[in-house]
């Protein structure tokens, strides 16, 4: 009885990571700047929601035959949350960071609620990727594109640094991914080395007024996300 309960809880946690991965894919690399600027228009917002739904269908694989009502519920919640954000942007266009943070938090809560619903009413699903694989993919997505978008928003009031974030987009993504890989190797008891960490001192950090801030960010962010990935693997 106890073994069944633990396995059930681990499966529930895994479903949350699958849905969260789909959210990050659709809300970051697949949401272009053009879509962000034009999401006030219904056709563009509808396209954004359709992309979310399509990505969820792909991520869960054949399990979509059983999960499609739950995935539709997430898409509907996403639509309502984005409509609320659009209203806040019209009402207070000077607010940038708070609407972004609240928007993402509400998406996570809606995904978590649906994951709990799936855990209660569904079982024995065939999922296409292993749980650990999904968590590692989440980590790399977080440390690259998700952080780029987040840092660009967080630094909106600091125009010079924001321009550096944009101009060094790809090089800093690569560095963060390599540093993140190094930290993952460091958490592995079979490996006591961090072969990629030294690369953080090259490429985008040799010029610019904010080079030290960028360097520190691209070390601490991979460190924090690697700790998050390690925690996620332990609890799921």
Image (cartoon, rainbow, N blue to C red):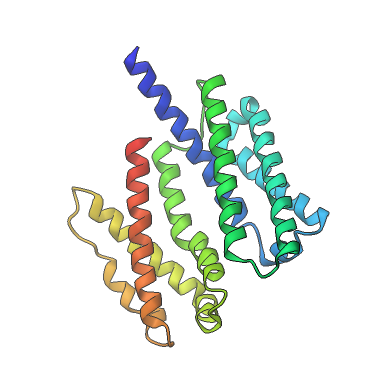
Q: Quadrant of residue 218?
A: bottom left
Task: Work out whether 195 lies above or below 111.
Answer: below
Residue 172: x percent and y percent? Answer: 44, 72
Q: Is residue 225 left or right of residue 100?
A: left
Quadrant including the C terminus: top left
Is residue 180 visible to us here? no
- Residue situated in front as seen by the camera: 37 or 175: 37
Q: How many marks?
A: 0
Q: Is residue 128 left or right of residue 110?
A: left
Horizontal and vertical percent for residue 74?
A: 65, 38
- Image check: 137 left or right of 83? left
Q: Residue at x 55, y 41 (%)?
A: 109
The residue nearer to you, when weighing 180 against 153, is 153
Say above or below: 78 vs 121: below
For the view shown, which residue lies furthest in the front direction?
91
Q: Is residue 224 visible?
A: yes
Residue 108 located left or right of residue 233? right
Residue 82 on image: x %, y %: 70, 51
Question: Which quadrant holds residue 108?
Answer: top right
Q: Which residue appears farthest toward the top when viewing the image?
A: 1
Q: What residue lies at 39% left-to-right and 77% top-to-bottom? A: 213
Q: Position of residue 184 (x, y in %)?
A: 30, 54
Which residue corresponds to the image point at 48% horizontal and 63% vertical from the top-left? 147
* x 27%, y 72%: residue: 198
Q: Quadrant of the N terminus?
A: top left
């Amino acid at each position: 009885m106890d073994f069944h309960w633990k396995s059930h809880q681990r499966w529930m946690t895994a479903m949350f990571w699958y849905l969260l991965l789909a959210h990050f894919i659709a809300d970051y690399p697949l949401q272009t700047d053009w879509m962000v600027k034009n999401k006030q228009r219904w056709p563009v917002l509808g396209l954004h929601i359709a992309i979310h739904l399509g990505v969820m269908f792909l991520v869960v694989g054949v399990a979509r035959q059983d999960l499609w009502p739950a995935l539709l519920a997430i898409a509907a919640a996403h639509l309502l949350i984005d409509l609320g954000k659009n209203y806040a942007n019209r009402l207070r266009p000077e607010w940038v960071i708070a609407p972004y943070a609240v928007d993402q938090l509400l998406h996570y809560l809606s995904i978590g609620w649906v994951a709990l619903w799936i855990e209660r009413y569904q079982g024995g699903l065939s999922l296409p990727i292993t749980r650990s694989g999904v968590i590692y993919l989440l980590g790399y997505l977080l440390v690259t594109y998700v952080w780029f978008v987040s840092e660009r928003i967080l630094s909106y009031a600091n125009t010079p640094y924001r321009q550096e974030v944009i101009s060094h987009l790809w090089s800093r993504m690569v560095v963060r991914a390599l540093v993140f890989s190094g930290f993952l190797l460091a958490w592995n008891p079979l490996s006591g080395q961090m072969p990629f960490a030294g690369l953080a001192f090259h490429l985008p950090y040799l010029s610019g007024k904010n080079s030290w801030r960028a360097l520190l960010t691209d070390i601490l962010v991979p460190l924090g996300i690697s700790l998050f990935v390690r925690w996620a693997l332990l609890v799921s």
